[in-house]
Image (tube, grey):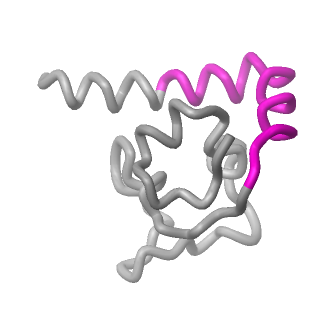
Amino acid sequence: MTCNKRFKWHGFVRRFFVNTFRRRYVRNQLRVRKGSCAQCGKCCRLVYRCPFLTKAGKCLIYTRGRPAQCRNFPVDIHDIERAGSNCGYYF
């Protein structure tokens, strides 16, 4: 496994852990998060291509049914750095 691939999986596991077990941290981070989703789709391709992402790069379940990891993304500056500079959120 390449270093880049390990880095991607580390972020995936980290986001799952934080959203599942550190809910207070997530709530606090969401309070200080600014901006809005630019719907660029980069977060939907961090580790693997999300099955709900259309060919046009839009989320099929954006308004209903998104998992907590999607709704809460990005939780902190590390997530924005991994997604790239097009993210509409900032801290």
Q: Is residue 35 magenta?
A: no
Residue placed furthest toward the left: 2
Q: What x and y, as percent, mark residue 57? A: 42, 74
* Residue at 59% in and 28% down: 16
Q: Is residue 29 left or right of residue 76?
A: right
Q: What x and y, as percent, mark residue 28? A: 85, 28
Q: Is residue 48 above or below residue 18?
A: below
Q: Is residue 19 above or below residue 54?
A: above
* Residue at 65% in and 63% down: 37
Q: Is residue 49 above or below residue 4?
A: below
**Region rendered in magenta:** 13-34
Q: What x and y, as percent, mark residue 87? A: 53, 57
* Residue at 31% in and 25% down: 7
Q: In which quarter of the view is residue 3 placed? A: top left
Image label count: 0
Q: Is residue 67 above or below residue 18?
A: below
Nearer to the camera, 35 or 12 = 35
Q: Main secondary structure of the magenta part?
A: helix
Image quarter (top left, top right, bottom left or bottom right) of the C terminus: top right
Image quarter (top left, top right, bottom left or bottom right) of the N terminus: top left
Q: Is residue 20 left or right of residue 2?
A: right
